[in-house]
Image (cartoon, rainbow, N blue to C red):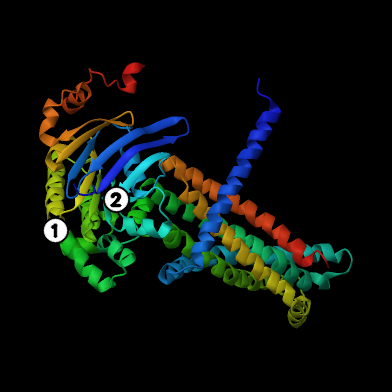
Amino acid sequence: MTNPLAIIGRVFLSALAEIGRLSAFAAEAISHIVRPPIYWRLIAQQMWLIGYNSLPVVGMTALFTGAALAQQIYVGGSRFNAESVVPGVVVIAIVRELGPVLGGLMVAGRVSSAMAAELGTMRVTEQIDALVTLSTDPFKYLIAPRLIAAVLTLPMLVIIANIIGVLGGYIIGTGKLGLNEATYLQVTSDFLEQSDVISSLVKAAVFGFFVALMGSYHGYNSRGGAQGVGKATTNAVVSAFIAILMSNLIITVIVFGAD
Amino acid sequence: MSVPMIELTGVHKGFGPKKVLQGIDLTVQHGESMVIIGGSGTGKSVMLKCILGLLKADKGSIKVNGEEVTTMGRSDRKQVLSKFGMLFQGAALFDSLPVWENVAFGLIQGKGMSKKEAHEIALEKLRRVGLTPDVGDLSPAELSGGMQKRVGLARAIATEPEIIFFDEPTTGLDPIMADVINDLIVECVKDLGATTLSITHDMASARKIADRIAMLYHGEIIWEGAKDEIDHSGNEYVDQFIHGRAQGPIQMEVLKL
């Protein structure tokens, strides 16, 4: 019979090894970001794929979440005659947490999987080996542009998601719940602080890094044909989700923990 | 005697407990066409990948034009890789680029040539492998297997490399298209004066493109000689392989069950 401690030990060691491989991969990728040549055309192409094509899903998510949030806060607040807190809580919740986190998760679901599938297919069809034989570093040509594009694009997407999320709350708040339009906007503006916006953008950039890193790492290292690519795609999304949620907690504690 | 173009000495490579290469010794001279034959899973592709640095050999020496490549740094290795061209088994064309850009890739990215100039050369190389310029604007997915192989060949010769590797160049092709590819390989290599190392289990292809043939079995070179000597090798493994007999010293896994 297998010793349970041995199983735990093996799992722990294997997790550590995976973290080590991921860290080495990230370090190699970052070293290529800062060294020329930089493939601007590929970065622009990736920014289009990650940013523009994710706008509908991120926008819809923010709109409906902001609207639902306003409704919930109104119901909760009305128990204490505090319906007027709706605009303030909506903007804080959206900008600090829901905008970046839900935006990051939506993009992770769409982009990490696509990156892993594309790079995984390139791996199993020897296209990545072909790049090397053509004197082109795959990290520089494939990985670095994706990382740069995701880190630059996620903050832009999150700014839009934040605006649309607040708009969702505004539509429900003024259209259904009877809150005054001018007051809603005034309270929103009063509650929002510069640090909220900065933390939102920092989170978005970090999430963008993880979205591209996980998609690239799992795709680049995929093995074993179609099944391997499928596994890489799933792993990319799951690990990107976990990385986003963990890093969100860490950034939140660092930025707002002292308040 | 001049320095060999490729020289492998005692090269070992394993994956976990599985020993794939178990002491490969092989020499390919300048301008020579060496063909490695051997069954599936004998380590032919692993050997090519070790020479290219796509896999790191566990032990042994690999020299390209006299330079040891196993201990080379990144920039030196890039320099050495610029001497190579390779035709992959499945062509390995980049899906995201049109055919002409696939052919011109090494010129644009590797040699820093302008797109306009590289486009002209790409069309010339496509013509060299019997494809018309209009093919250049197609996507690789729109091509048949034979056409993909030809584009792969055009890409391999586009930078006019000193060394070209051919990984199973005729696998998956009908006999006529396979012969067309073999002819193209012979012509293109003759034009360039390149040294070539090919791996195949297609004996018709080996006889057509080889100057010398070596047989790989269980991770070792068990026979090597001129193309004309292979029918009188006196090696029962080689005899069984070239005649494609199920009976003989080479036992397939399926027969052991």
- The numbered dot on residue B66 is 2
Label 1: which secondary element: helix
Q: Is residue B177 visible?
A: yes
Residue A61 image-quadrant placement: bottom right
Q: How many numbered discs? A: 2
* Crowd class of label 2 (few under 14; some 14 to 19; many from 20; radius 10 Å): few
Pinpoint the chain carrying mark 1. B
Question: Can you identify the residue that label 1 sits on?
Answer: B128
| Residue at 47 percent of width and 50 percent of height | A219
| Alpha carbons under labels 2 and 1: distance apart | 32 Å
Image vertical order of residue A13 relative to residue A37, above or below? above
Q: Is residue B146 left or right of residue A104?
A: left
Q: Is residue A103 left or right of residue B163?
A: right
- The numbered dot on residue B183 is none
In front: A87, or B195?
A: B195
Q: Earlier in the sequence, mark 2 or mark 1?
A: 2
Image vertical order of residue B48 relative to residue A213, above or below? above
Residue A37 image-quadrant placement: bottom left
| Residue B32: x %, y % from top left | 17, 46
* Crowd class of label 1 (few under 14; some 14 to 19; many from 20; radius 10 Å): some
In front: B172, or B162?
A: B162
Residue B205 image-quadrant placement: top left
| Residue A132: x %, y % from top left | 36, 55
| Residue at 19 percent of width and 64 percent of height | B123
Residue at the limit of the structure toward the right, as seen here: A80
Q: What is the three-letter code of the residue carrying label 1?
A: Arg
| Residue A226: x %, y % from top left | 42, 42
| Residue B178: x %, y % from top left | 16, 42
Pinpoint the chain carrying mark 2. B
Label 2: which secondary element: loop
Q: Is residue A109 left or right of residue A89?
A: left
Q: What is the three-letter code of the residue carrying label 2?
A: Gly
